[in-house]
Amino acid sequence: MMNRKLLAIVILCLIFFQNLLFAQSDEWSRGFTESHSGLRYKIIKQGVGDFPGPGDKVWIHFAGFLANDSIFENTMNKGPRDLFLGKGQLIKGWEEGLQLIKPGGTILLIVPPELAYGAMEHPFIPKNSTLRFEISLLQIDKGTPIELFSLEGKKIQKAKKKLRYYLVEKGIGAYAQKGDNAYVHFTAYLSDSTIFDSSHKNGEPVRITVGINQVITGWDMGLELMQKGSKIHLVIPPKLAYGKSGYKNLVPSNATIHLDLEMIDLVPPEPVVMWNNAGKTVKETLSGLKYVEFEAGTGELIEKEDVVEVHYSGYFTNGELFDSSVKRFDPIRFPVGIGAVIDGWDEGLLLMRKGSKFQLLVPSHLAYGEAGAPPQIPANSDLIFDIEVLDIIR
């Protein structure tokens, strides 16, 4: 027997199909409200329950129309679409419009190019098209409620480069330094309190290595103001955030970013020292790659297109460390032999097995060549990598 939730979805689908008749009527010519952004909308039917918000998963049926009334996409033959709000998956017009209806509701949207695909190429949609959508919201999966830090009674403080912050709660121990592994919960929002990302939606903190540009500059700077257990609110000016380009459909150009940060844990980097190859045999391939075997490993050799999980540390020839997954406690995964990594790695890994530990001496032409990899690696740099194969996934 059909359960109630499935029956409700079927009924909503039938309602949606019936509502498609509006596309060929004068419903598109009158009764629309225009928002501050330029989105025009008309609520055909309001649903019940909660409005969706950033981070929520929504199930929808929709039909998309061009100006000549032709349908360029319709979910009725494919089943409902499940999407996340506030994750950059959707055009701006959808992000705004979906938050105006509740489950069971239907809305018509007239989306100008700047809130749709603009001058971008898109299948079946000409450049700079105004689009029309009829959307029925079937159900919502609400994420964890997010509460912003209370700044009442707190004093705003100055940091470097016009970064401002509020110390919400003081932590204990040493302050974060470059190379430390910070485990933080965060909530990022705009000046109008619109949340566009939060670790609380995923239920676990994120790990960030301080000072290596994993995050926007203002965030990196803010981490160095924190201790384990501390809570801080950052006010990040555009130049230390996403600047003129903004971020996907979530952050407008030249927007000030607000960031609530809680330092759950702070772990110093693992000491990393280049493996000593004194007395070891250095072998060389025809391409000019040199390598030293420290541990042979077991099992079959890695093959092209195998996915490997490795720890690595990269050095310049003077012994200076420039990158290390070991310090981050974060091994990397990638397919071998298809150009996902530098040529020296692709070639060297095919000589290795699970458990292998090799030191690769990679000449510039098998690394980053004349282009280098700014800002860390200059042009024409020979590099040294200590690599341990942790796993092979076939």
Image (cartoon, rainbow, N blue to C red):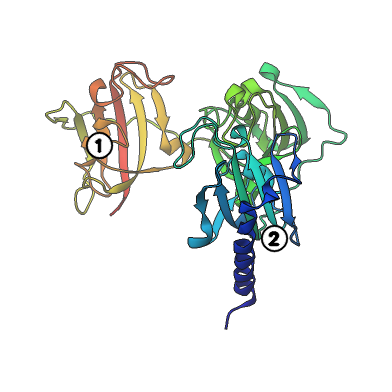
Residue at the extreme left: 286
Q: Is 329 positioned to the left or the right of 207 in the image?
A: left
Residue 91 lies, in percent from the top left, at: 58, 41
Check disc 2: other Cα within 10 Å, few if <14, some if 14-19, many if 20+.
many
Residue denoted by label 1? 346
Using the image as rendered, state which of residue 291 and residue 87 is in the foreground: 87
Relative height, residue 185 to residue 56 (above, below): above
Residue 199 lies, in percent from the top left, at: 62, 46
CA gap between label 2 and label 1 equals 50 Å
Q: What secondary structure is marked by label 1? A: helix
Using the image as rendered, state which of residue 136 and residue 305 is in the foreground: 136
Residue at the extreme bottom: 1
Residue denoted by label 2? 103
Using the image as rendered, state which of residue 69 and residue 185 is in the foreground: 69
Relative height, residue 325 to residue 201 (above, below): above
Look at label 1 and name its amino acid. Asp
Residue 104 lies, in percent from the top left, at: 69, 62
Check disc 1: other Cα within 10 Å, few if <14, some if 14-19, many if 20+.
some
Look at label 2 and name its amino acid. Pro
